[in-house]
Image: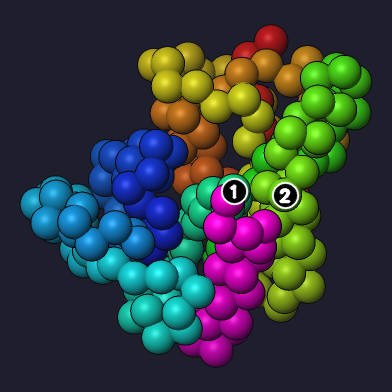
Amino acid sequence: MRLTIIGSTGRTGRHVLAEAGHRGHQITAFTRHADQVPELRALPCVSRALHGDGRDPQAMRDAIAGADTVIAIVGAARRKGPHHTAEVAAVITETMTELGIPRLVITSAYPIVATSPRLAIALLNRILADAYADMKAMEQIVTASDIGWRIARLNRLTDAPARGGTRITSGLLDKPTALTRADAAAALLDISQNPALARAAVNIAGPR
């Protein structure tokens, strides 16, 4: 698979990059951190390493041209404004439509749809109001597009080693347990190749 990973040097993106390399995919790694490009180019699994702003249409066009699949791990902005993720999503979907690229997997946050535990969700929605507004706007942009999107709502990411037993469901999680970034990376790649999940939003957590 010819794969572009947007956000390839983030804490989750690095795991996606490693897992995609392990699976033998042809990878273009895109990052907004120019200083990390030499490190990416030194990786045997990376065919191309590019840097730029995800809100720049030309930078995005260069990054995803020729790809079969795009995986985007774009964190919501904090102090710089509430709509960074939504703006990047708009550029991604418009560029993929223009270039005829069929598959997008983009990460979101499970708490934006969760209803329990009620107190914890209420606190998160208050503390992370701008970030979650950004995620919700991103989801609206993606679902309105004509591409074969998949939204992956991740729950309580940790840096622990992979555990396995990852749960992926279109419904609410009955027990929203923590998910390791390594397991999240494997789930994102699995989702990208599952035709049954085209144009679906799924919620992802670790084992019960």
Q: Is residue 98 left or right of residue 122?
A: left
Q: Is residue 46 left or right of residue 72?
A: left
Structural crowding at the residue carrying mark 1, measured as other residues with C-alpha within 10 Å and reported as few (<14), some (14–19) or many (≥20): some
Range of magenta residues: 79-100
Identified by mark 2, the residue type is Asp
Q: Is residue 165 visible?
A: yes
Residue 169 in picture, x, y percent from top left: 75, 34
Q: Nearer the viewer, residue 65 or 41?
A: 41
- Image position of 117 with respect to 11: above or below: above
Residue 54 in picture, x, y percent from top left: 46, 69
Q: Secondary structure at mark 1?
A: loop
The residue where tag 2 is placed is: 130
Q: Nearer the viewer, residue 147 or 43?
A: 43
Question: Any mark on residue 78, and which?
Answer: 1
Q: Is residue 139 visible?
A: no
Q: Magenta stretch mostly in which secondary structure? A: helix
Residue 202 in picture, x, y percent from top left: 72, 43
When asked about the image quadrant of residue 106, the answer is: bottom right
Residue at image position (33%, 41%) is: 14
Image quadrant holding the N terminus, namely: bottom left
